[in-house]
Image (cartoon, rainbow, N blue to C red):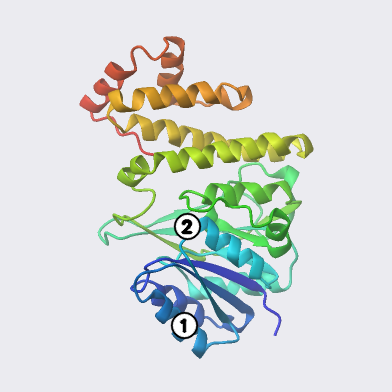
Amino acid sequence: MEKILTISIAAYNAEFDIRRCLDSFVNSKVFELLEIIVVNDGSKDNTLKVARQYEEQYPESIKVIDKKNGGHGSTINASIKNATGKYYKIVDSDDWVDSKELEKLVIWLKSNDVDLVLTPYKCVNANKNDKHELVYPYNKSKAIGKITNIDKNEDIIVYMHSTTFKKEIVKKMGAIIDENCFYVDLEYTIFPLCYVKNFVCLDFVVYQYLLGTADQSMNINNLIRRRNQHLRVVKRIINYYSDKKGGLTEQVKKMITDRIRSAILSQYKIYANMNPRESLIEIKKFDCWLKDFPELYMGERGKFMKIIYYNRATGFIFYVPIMRVLKWMHVELKV
C-alpha cells in the first residue's frame, strides 16, 4: 500500500514517552497509510527495545533505525534518506498527535498535491493546572484549504510542529541538518523554503506539543547552557540564506528573514538572561559578527531591541548596569 505520510520520530532515552507517541498513530484509522520511522539516537535506556516491539507488531508501517548518538539533526537526516511517503512530518518522541485530526490531514494529503502544509498545534502544559494554548502559523482570516503560491504568503510562519512538507522538497534540501547540536528545528523549517512553490493552510490541530518539562531544550537554563549551539544554528541559517537569497523572490526572502530575525532576537535574549558581566564579551562579539549582514542587523522592532540599539550606539559601556536594573525590576525576558 502506498504510504501517504512519513513520520520521523527522534528518540533518545524516551522509554517512558514513546508508547504514548506511537499509540497516537496506531490508534488512528489511517495508520496503514503511514510510514513511521523511529530513529533511536543512541539511547541508554529501553527506548530501542520498546520501538522494536512496535516494529515487530506493525512491520508494514513502523521501521526502526538504530544509530549512535548524533543529536536531533542526525535523526532528521537519517529519516529523510529513508522516507518513502508522499509527505514528510517530524514528531518528537515526547509529543504526540490527535488521532482524529491526523485522520483528517492524511485524507486531505492523499487527494491533494502541495509543497507545504501548515496546521495549528496545541501546547499541552505539563502542569495540568496551566491552560493549553492553540498556536496558529497563519492569520485565522486566511482561506482554509486553498492552495496558494508561496509568493502570496502574507502572515504565515513556518513552525516545526505546524509543518508538513512534500517528501520531494526535503529530498531536494538533502540530509544537511547540523548534527550533534540542539535547535536545528530552525534549519529544518528554513532550508526547504528555498524549494517551496506553493502552500496550504488547514485547520486540523494535529500536533500536541508538551511544554513545561525541565529537560526541554527551550528551558531558559538549558538555553543558557547550550547558547553556543543556538549561536551555531543562528549563524548557519544566516549564512545559508546569504548563499541562496539571489535566487529567491522578495516574498520568500521576507518569510525567511522574519524567522531569522526571531532567532537573532532569541540569541540576544539568551545573553540578557545571563549574568551581565559574563555575557558582555559574548554579546559584543555576536553583535560585531552580525554587523556584516546589514539586512539583518537593523530593522527588528520592539522594546528589547531598543535596548540593544542603545548599547550599540554607546559601545555597550552601559550594558552591565542596564541589565542589572532590568533584573532588579523583574523584567521578564522570555526567549
Residue 334 % position (x, y): 36, 38
Q: Residue 52 — which label?
A: 1
Residue 34 % position (x, y): 60, 77
Q: Earlier in the sequence, mark 2 or mark 1?
A: 1
> Residue at 68% across / 60% down in the picture?
145
Front residue of 86 and 156: 86
> Residue at 44% across / 36% down in the picture?
266
Q: Could you tell me how far apart the alpha carbons at marks 2 and 1 are, in whole angstroms?
A: 20 Å
Q: Amino acid at mark 2?
A: Gly
What secondary structure is found at the residue carrying circle 2?
loop
Front residue of 298 and 51: 51
Q: Is residue 309 visible?
A: yes
Residue position for label 2: 71
Q: Amino acid at mark 1?
A: Arg
Q: Residues within 10 Å of mark 2 (few under 14, many from 20)?
A: many
Looking at this rendering, what residue extends furthest in the bottom direction?
A: 57
Q: Residues within 10 Å of mark 1 (few under 14, many from 20)?
A: some
Looking at this rendering, what residue extends furthest in the front direction?
A: 68
> Residue at 35% across / 23% down in the picture?
280
Residue 244 % position (x, y): 72, 39
> Residue at 49% across / 64% down in the picture?
207
